[in-house]
Each structure stands twice: as structure tokens, then as C-alpha cells.
Amino acid sequence: FFFSGSVSIAGAEVFQQSNSPFVLCFSSVSNVVGSKAWITNSGEAGFFIVFANIDHSLGYKGITAFLVDGSNPGIRVGKREDKLGIRSSSTCEVILDNCVVSEEDVLGEVGKGYKYAIEVLNEGRIGIAAQMLGLAQGALDATMPYIIQRQQFGKSIASFQGVQFDYAQIATEIQAARLLVYNATRLQEAGLPFVKEAAMAKLFTSNIAANAASKCVEMLGGVGFTKEFPVEKFYRDSKIGQIYEGTSNIQLQTIAGFVKKDYE
């Protein structure tokens, strides 16, 4: 499956209806050919969840989810992006060209697509936060053994005060991030409001992951800049955390809304 919210051309997903079948497209105009960009795992997907508006007069209440089989002749996968990081996961363009589906392909209820999408995004932010937490921990775990055994001026690099400041700061940020992730997860599993906490967890973990990976490359020195150590990969992978499932600015906007409401 894939899920994405990025459109390569102006406009929102719509569909046209001809008698009983639906014809899906990714365009705000009347043609039925269009594309959608940055579709995660689309190179391997066998099914595609497409969110399309069945009636623009209903606004977001017209958005409906369709489950489209990858064998449908009206859907195809286009260019695979040559990315900075998370390279093992395909990211491609998906093209809809007169993609005919039926009412049987509606996923869930008609008009509930927006609700489903928001729920997936809110919960997904906890998943991205956990991913970035693991990345930060992995960078530190790959770095510490080397700087402990690496000798300069007769003693371990890890014993130099300047280096200690760096890994102490990273370890503290990782622990704080872990608690944010656990708290958001606890609330979600208990069926309690968690949107603000999920946004906080994603914002913080994506920032500390980028910092941890960058500092670990520096602490490793020259070897950190090579592919002999995994930290350069962690460094490249870390940037996506501040972009997908809602950018850092989107998280800040979400958090600000809740904070403002608390004081009104």
C-alpha cells in the first residue's frame, strides 16, 4: 500500500462519474490524466489507496477513499526518485490515466476519506517520531565504541571534555525524546487525545535525530565521513524526519493551536 499527500500539479484529487463507474484522476480540471508525487513504497505496492473528492460542493466531506488494484490499467508507477536518504524505500510518481473503479472499490464509507486520512497522519507521526528516536540512538551506539577505543595524545577521545559535552547532550536529548514518544503512544493506546503530544514528539525527535547524526559524524572524524561506518547513512536518513508526515513548521502550527486554546 501507499499513502501520500503531495500533488505534483495544482489542485486536489477529484473523480468524474460516467454512468455507474468512477474515473479517478489527480487534477483539478476536467481531464482524467494526472500524477501524484512522492508516493512512498509505490514501487512495491500491489494496491493503492486513493483519496478523491466525489462532490466538491461538500468540501472535505466529499473526500472518499478508494482501494485501487495495482493491476488496474488506469494506474501506473512513474519515475523513481534518486533520494538523499531512506533509499531502501521507493519513492515514485503515480499516474492515473482514465482509472476506472466501482463502488465496490470504496474503502470504508463514502465521504469519510478525510477522517481516515487525518487519523492515519496523526498516528503516523508517532511512528515517525519512533523512527527518528531509533535513528538517533543508532548513531550514538555506532559512535561510542569507536571514540572510547580511539586514542589521541595518549588517551581516549571520549575522555576529552569537549567531546564529552557532545555525547552527553545527545544522550540527554535521546532520553527526553524517548519519553515524548512513550507518552504520545500511551495516550493513543488509551484512546485519549494525543494529537498535540504526537506533534511534539515528531517535532522534537526529528530535530534531535538530525543533531545527533551530525554530531556523531563529527566525533568520528574522517571515518564518520566514509561508508565504513553507518553514521553517514543515519545522517542522510535523518533529514526526512523534518519533512514527511507533516513538516516541522506544520507540527509547530499544530502545537501552537493547542497551546493557544489552553489559555483562552
Image (cartoon, grey):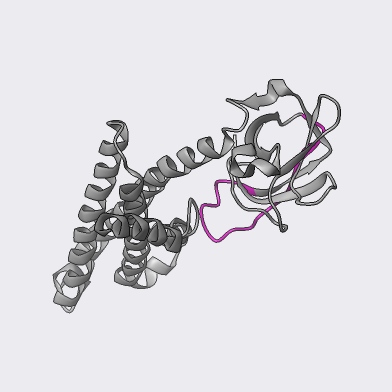
Is 169 in front, or is 129?
129
Residue 50 in which image quadrant: top right
Residue 40 locus on image (x, y percent)? 58, 45
Is 168 in front, or is 1?
1
Q: Residue furthest top?
A: 104
Q: Quadrant of the C terminus?
A: bottom left
Can residue 142 be seen here? The reply is no
Residue 39 locus on image (x, y percent)? 62, 47
Q: Residue furthest bottom?
A: 153
Residue 116 locus on image (x, y percent)? 52, 35
Residue 101 in which image quadrant: top right
Does residue 230 appear to the left or right of 148 in the view shown? right
Is 76 in front, or is 124?
124
Q: Magenta span covers which residues?
A: 72-91
Residue 253 locus on image (x, y percent)? 41, 61
Looking at the image, residue 156 lies above or below residue 177: below
Whether residue 83 is in magenta: the answer is yes
Q: Main secondary structure of the magenta part?
A: loop
Does residue 137 appear to the left or right of 113 in the view shown? left
Can residue 27 be seen here? The reply is yes
Looking at the image, residue 133 lies above or below residue 159: above
Q: How many marks?
A: 0
Is 2 in front, or is 43?
2
- Name the residue: 47% across, 59% down: 247
Residue 57 in which image quadrant: top right
- Name the residue: 59% across, 38% down: 61
- Name the residue: 70% across, 30% down: 68
Whether residue 117 is in magenta: the answer is no
